[in-house]
Amino acid sequence: MTQGEALSILKTGANVYLTGEPGSGKTHAINEFIAWLRLSGIEPAITAATGIAATHVGGMTLHSWSGIGIAESLSRADIDRIAGKEHVARRLQKASVLIIEEISMLSAATFEMADAICREARRAELPFGGLTVILVGDFFQLPPVARVQAMSVRFAYASPVWDKLNPITCYLTDQYRQDDVEFLGVLSAIRAGEVEEAHYEALMARHTEPGTPPACAPKLFSHNADVDRINAQELAKLPGKAKTFRMNAKGKEQFVEGLKRGCLSPEILELKEGAAVMFTKNSPQGKFVNGTLGVVAGWSFDGSPIVEIRSPSTSSGHRFRVTAEPMEWQLEEQGKVRASISQLPLRLAYAMTVHKSQGMSMDAAVIDLSKAFEYGQGYVALSRVRRLSGVHLTGLNARALEVHPEILEKDREFRAASDAAREAFAALPSAELAGMQKKFVKAIGGAWPNPSQSLGTARQPGSAGLPGRLAETLQTVRDANDLNAAAKARGLTVSTIVKHLEELAEIGKLASADFEHLISQGELHEIAEAIEAAGRERLSPVYHALGGRHSFETIRLVRLLK
C-alpha cells in the first residue's frame, strides 16, 4: 500500500494499524494525517510506547497520557482512582483521535490498561471509550521490555482489545531509506525468513576487523554503559579543550523531564574539533536528517559547531558544511505546547544503543552481531543503515539473521489484510470515499479543509488520472534540473523519485521527454553501453562495470530510456 492510499483510509476515521518495513515512511504518513486533522480543526492525542518515540512525534508516552504511569497491573479501585483524576479525565474526554507510535514496544498488558482507563473516563464500553485509534509500528522491530526478567511479554496484537478495535491494516510498501538494491534484497530475505547463502555472503563481505572500523561510523551496543564509556574515551583522545553546550528548557518539570529522557541530544553536550557527531533531528531545509553523520570541522563566529557532512542524497563522496544551531523539541497537548527543550541537534557518534537508533536513517554503522541472542536483533540494527557499503560488521552469528516465527506468521496475515483493504477502498467511488471522510470530520466536531490547503494528494496539470504521489513526482521531475533537485522539492529520497518514475513507466504514463533532461549525454552513452554488455536485469553488475562512477539511480534512469 502507498502512503497516499493509507492516508485516504486514515481520513475515514476507521481504527487503523499503520505498518511497513523500516524506512517505508510510517512516521511521514502519520505526520501527514496529523497535519490534515489540524487543518480540519481536530487536535489528535499523540502518544508513543517509549519516551524516545514520543519525543520524535512531539507527544507523550501512552503511560503518561492515560495516567497509568509505571503500573504493571490495575485493580478496579486503581481504574476508578486514575480515571477520577480531573486532569486525566479532562484530557481523555476531550480527545477524539488517539495515535500510538511504536506499538511493537507496547505490551498487551499496558494496551489493556490504557483501554480500561479510557472506557472508564469516557463512560463508554467501546474499545478505548469510542476513540478513533491509530496504531503505528512494525512488530519485527524492538519488542516490549519486561521489567521482570523471567516474565514473558505478549505483543499488543495478542490482546482481546486489538480484536475489538478491529483495525484496518495499512501495510506501506514503498522504501524511502535504503536505495541499494542488493541490501534491500538482504533485508527482505531476513524479514521473510528466507535467508540464503548469497545473502549471508553479501553481509560477510562487509566484515571489518574490530580494530579497523571507519572513524566516523558509530558502534551500536545494547547497553548505555558501553556507549557512554566509548564516547568519553574517544572525545578525550582529541586535542584541545571541549566546548560545552547546555540544554534550555521551559514548562512543567514533569513534562520537561520526559522530553529530556526521550531526546537523543544530551542535556550537556561536549564537543571538540574533529569529534565524530550525529544529527538527532531532521533539518527543515533538508540539509540533514536524524542519523546523518559528520565531523566537527570548526566553530562559527558565535561559537556554534560547523559540521562537515556527506550529502545524504548521493552516493558520491561530496561533502559540505553546515553550522549546527539549536533546535527545539516540544510536547504538545490539545494544540498547546506544554513543555519544550532546546539543544544542538547533535550527539557524539562513536557509539550508541540499538534502542536509541530506532527510527534513524544512518549513513554507516559498526555492528557486532556475534552475540545476538534475540530474534530480530540483527534485522533492527542492519535496517538503520541506508546502504550495504555503510555496514561494517565485526561479527555475525546465525541468530542475528532470524526473526520470530510468530511474528513471521502474523506478518503474513497483516500483509493479506492490507491487500484486501487496498482492494476494497480502491473499488469505492471517489465521491463515496470523500463522503466517508467528511462524515468523520463532522462527527468529531471538525470542519472540512479548504481544497487549496489539502495535503499530499494534489493532482498536477497534465497528470490527470494518476495517483496523487505519482502526479506530483512527474510534474516535479519535468520542472527539475537534476535528480537531487527533484528529490529535495518532493521531500523524498532520490531512489524513491526513480521508483515513482518506474511505476509510471509500468502503467504507460512516462515519456522519455519527461525525464531525459536529468541525464547528461556522457552519462547516457557510458551507462547504456554497460547495460548492453552486462544485461538489464541486475543493477550491481552494471554498477561495478562502471567502477562506481555513476549512482544506482542514474543507471535506473538510463534503463528506463531503453
Image: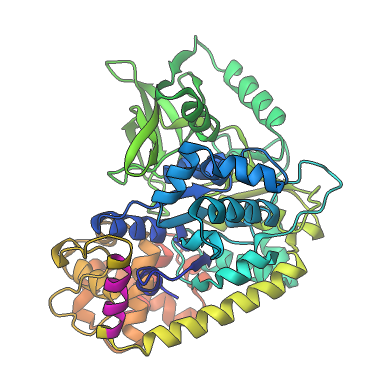
Which residue is nearer to you in this view: 414 or 332? 332
Residue 63 % position (x, y): 58, 43
Whether the magenta-drawn stretch holds residue 466 is answered as: no
- Residue 310 at least partly seen: yes
Q: Is residue 68 above or below residue 490?
A: above
Quarter-of-image position of residue 252: top left
Give me the residue at 66% from left, 30% from top: 227
Q: Quadrant of the C terminus?
A: bottom left
The location of residue 35, given as percent across then percent down, is 30, 55
Which segment did they paint magenta? Answer: 432-441
Can you say which quadrant of the picture contains the N terminus? bottom left
Residue 45 is left or right of residue 165, and the answer is left
Could you say where residue 381 lies in the image, as x and y percent from the top left? Answer: 64, 51
Q: How many marks?
A: 0
Q: Is residue 185 visible?
A: no
Q: x, y percentage for residue 186?
A: 63, 67
Residue 436 located within the stretch drawn in magenta: yes
Q: Main secondary structure of the magenta part?
A: helix
Q: Is residue 293 above or below residue 151?
A: above
Residue 122 drawn above or below residue 80: below
Q: Quadrant of residue 209?
A: top right
Q: Nearer the viewer, residue 155 or 401?
A: 155
Decide if residue 106 is on the left or right side of residue 309.
Answer: right
Quadrant in which residue 292 is drawn: top left
- In this rendered view, identify the residue nearer to me: 304 or 459: 459
Q: Is residue 249 or residue 3 the one in the foreground?
A: 249
165 vs 242: above or below: below
